[in-house]
Amino acid sequence: MKKIMTVCLSAVAIAAGAYAEKAVESAPGAKESKEPVQAPVRENVRRPGRRKSGMPQQFRQRAASHKFLGYFGRTADGKVAKIYRIEGRGGLILDVTDYGGRVVRCYAPDKHGNLADVTLGWNTAEEYNKNGFSMGTLIGRFGNRIKDGKFKLDGKEYSVPINENKPPRHNALHGGTAGWDTAIWAVKPLREGPAVRGLELMHVSKDGDMGFPGTVTCKVKYRVMPNNVWSVEYEATTDKPTVINLTHHSYWNLAGEASGNVLKQQLQIFADSYTDVDDGLIPVKDLPVKGTGFDFTALREIGSMADWMAKNDHLKPMDNWYDHNFVLRGKAGEWKQAAIMKDPLSGRKLEIWTTEPCMQIYGAQNMDGTMDAKAAGKKLVQFAGIALETQHYPDSPNRPDFPSTVLRPGETYRSRTEYRFTAE
């Protein structure tokens, strides 16, 4: 069966994979280095001036480009991670590491043309190892939760290691204890004409990896367009029947990372229902959003229904906040708008479009101000960002009433999501 998901982000210059490998090998002492060189950190990038409409004046003659920035640290199992930069003609800049395909930084222009990093994350691979939160990463082989880590496929039961074990939660989350976020992905440059740059990332997940059947070969293309759209396109094949549910787990704060919480920023979700869950955060049934704190059918402040959420005892397992699946209008595979997020002060606006049937919302309620941000001296406070994860339903392998996540030999999984950045 076929599925499609592409994620479009703004035009950025791309860090070339082959070029990157060459650059790494030619660096003096690179192979012997015990301590990888940290890539330069851009806390704020400012550009003066802006046209009232269209592309900011300072970016109009800018060429799309790609750069290998350097080493990013080491993974938990000691592998060296690298980081690349994609720069788009419209001003959008992405810093991407091959470690889980993470988007480490995403610089987007505000209404005056000033750039700020609008995604949460950290400056080294070691911090990602330590802090978790699936920060900014590609998620696979199966995004979201599988109850008890078990599912049946063609009459045979499979088990995925439990990595969410906080009773009554007992789930395999985001692919198990070593999902695709822990892998070093093969990277090569992607160039489409003079204005589009990107990266193609590839990962081979062997038969039995985290208990899943079949060897899956997955390619993910990050494209940055001149109109500040970041596109992520997934494609995967398998040699045995398996299940697959891929997504991207960036956290967004359109005022800039470490600028505070996002409760005053605005959100609209193109969904008339959400998925109610039990105390283990496993789906029960879909419910209408109307008249509830889950009603984002019109643009509103993210925190405007905080009192309703706090008074709802049924939401205590989620700390009385958002960790829920929203059922988007339209069928799986259809191109549809999923969400709009807006920061009134900076004027930044993010639109999300996808072919996926659902979007999981996680509101960063478990961040507590103890973790460092990328900006020096800053911390990630509670509600520091919001994750908007386009995907299929949680626990789909155990729910035949949900859109199927089964992939069989001879079929190609395809999925697409776009992140469209503007300012007004």
Image (spheres, rainbow, N blue to C red):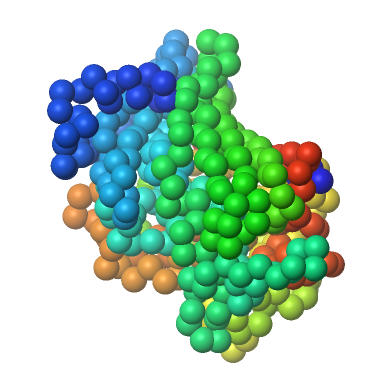
At x 32%, y 19%, the residue is: 22
- Pick the residue in front: 363 or 70: 70
- Left or right placement of residue 96 versus residue 325 in this view: left
Measuring from the top left, give residue 96's x and y in whole percent.
41, 37
- Residue 414 seen anywhere in this rendered image of the structure: yes
Hey, which quadrant is residue 18 in on the image?
A: top left
Measuring from the top left, give residue 238's x and y in whole percent.
68, 44
- Residue 232 seen anywhere in this rendered image of the structure: no
- Left or right placement of residue 217 versus residue 355 in this view: left
Measuring from the top left, give residue 69's x and y in whole percent.
29, 29
Hey, which quadrant is residue 72 in on the image?
A: top left
Judge whether 8 appears above or below 381 on screen: above
At x 80%, y 68%, the residue is: 155
Looking at the image, the residue that sits furthest to the bottom is: 313
Judge whether 173 appears above or below 201 on screen: below
Measuring from the top left, give residue 268's x and y in whole percent.
65, 55
- Pick the residue in front: 131 or 81: 81
Please state the total of marks drawn on the protein image: 0
- Left or right placement of residue 177 versus residue 327 in this view: left
Instruction: Quadrant for the C terminus, please.
Output: top right
- Left or right placement of residue 259 versus residue 28 in this view: right
At x 32%, y 53%, the residue is: 77
Hey, which quadrant is residue 15 in on the image?
A: top left
At x 77%, y 48%, the residue is: 408
